[in-house]
Image (spheres, rainbow, N blue to C red):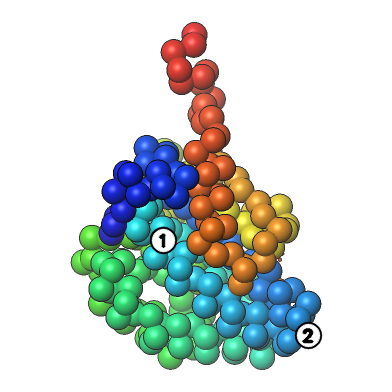
């Protein structure tokens, strides 16, 4: 739920009328963060989970409406079993620890992706968080778990074809997991790589892209402010001409 006044938002160096409605984040670099500290990769994932709290909180406080975070891709299933096990454990721990505060902040949690692939304990934890927060009016937090953009598009296409033999763009959009969050305005990727890695392929058609070398566990509120400032400085034309009256 938006907490800050316009004046407070300006005090962060942000423009109240240029806060993106939908922010998506590829939270990358956990493993390298740990390795460069001589720690096992799991410690990087743990530090990454801890970094989330401030980012969700600040996004909500400045009035971002939807935050979609990439936690586990369909391709991440290729990772070693023990790393996947650590991630599952962290996921359960995360929800158990954070759910009350998220709920108190009116955050509405949804998972996107094929949850059925995960162990039952993970599915149950995530579903419980979704049910508990379903009616909340605040930040829409979409957590991508076993998510792939291509798989999402195939699913949306199949669902749309139940409505019509010739689905149009709106029919596809309506059947995406993120239908009620709309297109992504700002896509952030941490960790230094500049690629999309099968995230929200449809929804990022006109997103502003922001890449940073900062690894996810080090992505603090100040780093998010930098990304929001960069977004505010971009001129979005959506294929048209400058929006300031030039013809
Ligand atoms: C992102 O961090 C988290 C997941 C993919 C689960 P990585 O684990 O990909 O970290 P790096 O890219 O190896 O540093
Ligand atoms: C993208 O990171 C997926 C998540 C952050 C969950 P990866 O580390 O899996 O991406 P690639 O393999 O470098 O493209
Ligand atoms: Mg990675």
The residue beneath circle 2 is 38
**Direction from residue 143 to residue 26 in the image, left or right:** right
Examine the rendering and report whether any part of residue 170 can be seen. no
**Direction from residue 85 to residue 116 in the image, left or right:** left
**Direction from residue 150 to residue 124 in the image, left or right:** left
The residue beneath circle 1 is 58
**Direction from residue 15 to residue 71 in the image, left or right:** right
- The foreground one among 216 and 66 is 216
Q: Quadrant of residue 73?
A: bottom right
Q: Quadrant of the N terminus?
A: bottom left
Q: Position of residue 95 (x, y in %)?
A: 40, 82
Q: Earlier in the sequence, mark 2 or mark 1?
A: 2
> Could you tell me which residue is drawn at 49 percent across and 88 percent down?
119
Q: Quadrant of residue 205?
A: top right
- The foreground one among 205 and 61 is 61
> Could you tell me which residue is drawn at 65 percent across and 51 percent down?
211
CA–CA distance in space, label 2 to label 1: 31 Å
> Could you tell me which residue is drawn at 42 percent across and 40 percent down?
15
Q: Which mark is residue 172?
A: none
Residue neighbourhood size for the residue with mark 2, other residues' Cα within 10 Å, grouped as few (<14), some (14–19), many (≥20): few
Q: Is residue 126 above or below residue 192?
A: below
- The foreground one among 79 and 90 is 90
Q: Position of residue 32 (x, y in %)?
A: 74, 74
- The foreground one among 19 and 155 is 19
Q: Is mark 2 within 8 Å of ligand 1?
A: no
Q: Position of residue 204 (x, y in %)?
A: 53, 46
Quick one: SS at disc 1? helix
Examine the rendering and report whether any part of residue 33 can be seen. yes
Q: Is residue 105 above or below residue 164?
A: below
> Could you tell me which residue is drawn at 35 percent across and 49 percent down?
8
Q: Quadrant of residue 124?
A: bottom left
């Amino acid at each position: 739920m938006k907490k800050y006044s316009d004046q407070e938002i300006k005090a962060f160096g942000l423009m109240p009328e240029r806060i993106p409605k939908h922010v998506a984040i590829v939270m990358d670099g956990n493993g390298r963060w740990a390795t460069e500290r001589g720690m096992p990769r799991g410690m990087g994932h743990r530090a990454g989970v801890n970094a989330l709290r401030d980012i969700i909180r600040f996004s909500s406080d400045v009035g971002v409406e939807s935050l979609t975070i990439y936690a586990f891709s369909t391709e991440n299933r290729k990772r070693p079993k023990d790393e996947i096990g650590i991630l599952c454990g962290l996921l359960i721990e995360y929800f158990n620890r954070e759910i009350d505060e998220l709920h108190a902040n009116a955050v509405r949690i949804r998972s996107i992706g094929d949850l059925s692939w995960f162990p039952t304990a993970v599915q149950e934890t995530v579903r419980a968080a979704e049910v508990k927060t379903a009616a909340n009016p605040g930040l829409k937090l979409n957590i991508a778990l076993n998510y792939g953009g291509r798989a999402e598009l195939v699913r949306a296409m199949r669902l749309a074809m139940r409505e019509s033999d010739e689905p149009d763009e709106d029919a596809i959009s309506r059947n995406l997991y993120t239908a009620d969050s709309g297109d992504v305005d700002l896509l952030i990727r941490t960790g230094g790589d500049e690629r999309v890695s099968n995230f929200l392929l449809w929804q990022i058609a006109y997103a502003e892209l922001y890449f940073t070398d900062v690894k996810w566990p080090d992505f603090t509120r100040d780093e998010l402010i930098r990304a929001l400032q960069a977004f505010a400085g971009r001129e979005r034309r959506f294929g048209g001409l400058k929006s300031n009256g030039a013809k």
